[in-house]
Structure formats: structure tokens, C-alpha cells
Amino acid sequence: MNKKGPIVLIDDDQDDLHLLIEIFSDFNLPNEIHLFKNTDSVVAFLRKPEVDPFLIISDINMPVTNGFRLREMILNDPQISNRNVPYIFFTTSTMLKVVAIGKGPTFQGIFKKPTRHSEWKETLSAIVLYWTLSMPPDEYEL
């Protein structure tokens, strides 16, 4: 995990993307923020050898390729999956069926998109703080 790498945000909703831009700019993080509305362009970006993201935060309900399928594509691509990037879902869906579908491919959390701006900011801040403080697997001592 590259804590100085870019944060990748994937959402097909333009309003949510604008809100994410606003919130992440308020955080004043050293990480570049990359926004994607299209899952194909995300995979192409992540395949670049020089790209080593810190976090991927993805919506679930997206047209063509949903977030679970995108996560599966990333896990099945050795060029991308060997980087051990935390993958977080940020979604409006709270249906048990949707969450149950996500039990197959691994991910590091599902968070419900809040209704208030302040709650968005608190949740995203907590996610970033958690992963900033966590110890990457390659730093474990045996």
C-alpha cells in the first residue's frame, strides 16, 4: 500500500463526484485525487505501471459494470491486484441482497452514502485516517 499514492474515486453520479471533489480538497491531502465515471477507464488507469494507489473508493450501483464486478476485474488482473490497494464501497444501497453479493470478492468495507454534507465529510475523513494509520502487509514482521 502506497500511502502517498493517488486516491481513486469511482462514481457515475455527477453530483456525488462534485461533492467528493469538494470534500477531498478540504482535507488538504498530499495524495492526488483521480475521479472516474467509467469503469473501463479506471482499469486502464490502474494498469499503468507507475500508478500505485493509496485507496480506491467505489460506488456499487453503476451502469454497465457495477462496483462488485469492477472489484472482481481488479482482483483478477495481476498487474493491478499485486499492489494490495484497499478497496472501499461508498453506496446509497442498503439492500441486504446487494451486500450479500459483495461477499464473493474481497473488499475492505461498505459505507452508506450519508444524506448530509457533514456526515459525508466525517465518514470519508474516518476512512482516510484509518488507512493512513494502518500498517501495510509488507511492513509486518514475522
Image (cartoon, rainbow, N blue to C red):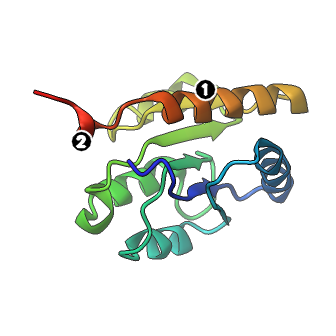
Q: Residue at x 24, y 42 (%)?
A: 138
Residue under the image location 46 percent in, 47 percent down: 68
Count of all numbered marks drawn on residues in the image = 2
Front residue of this view, candidates 80 and 112: 80
Name the residue carrying label 1.
Answer: 95
Q: Residue at x 68, y 55 (%)?
A: 11
Using residue 2 as the reference point, say whether residue 91 is left or right of it: right
- Secondary structure beneath dot 2 equals helix
- Neighbor class of circle 2 (other Cα within 10 Å; few <14, some 14-19, many 20+) is few
Residue 37 appears in view = yes
User: Which sits in the foreground, 43 or 49?
Assistant: 49
**Is 28 positioned to the left or the right of 49 in the image?**
right
Residue 138 is labelled as 2
Give residue 82's position: percent from left, percent from top. Answer: 25, 56
Q: Residues within 10 Å of mark 1 (few under 14, many from 20)?
A: few
Badge 1 element? loop
Percent from the top left, x then y, of residue 30?
A: 64, 53
Label ID, residue 139: none
Residue nearer the viewer, 67 or 18: 18
Q: Identify residue type, mark 1.
A: Met
The quarter of the displayed image where residue 140 is located: top left
Res. 116 visible in picture:
no
Amino acid of disc 2: Asp
N-term mark: 2 or 1 = 1
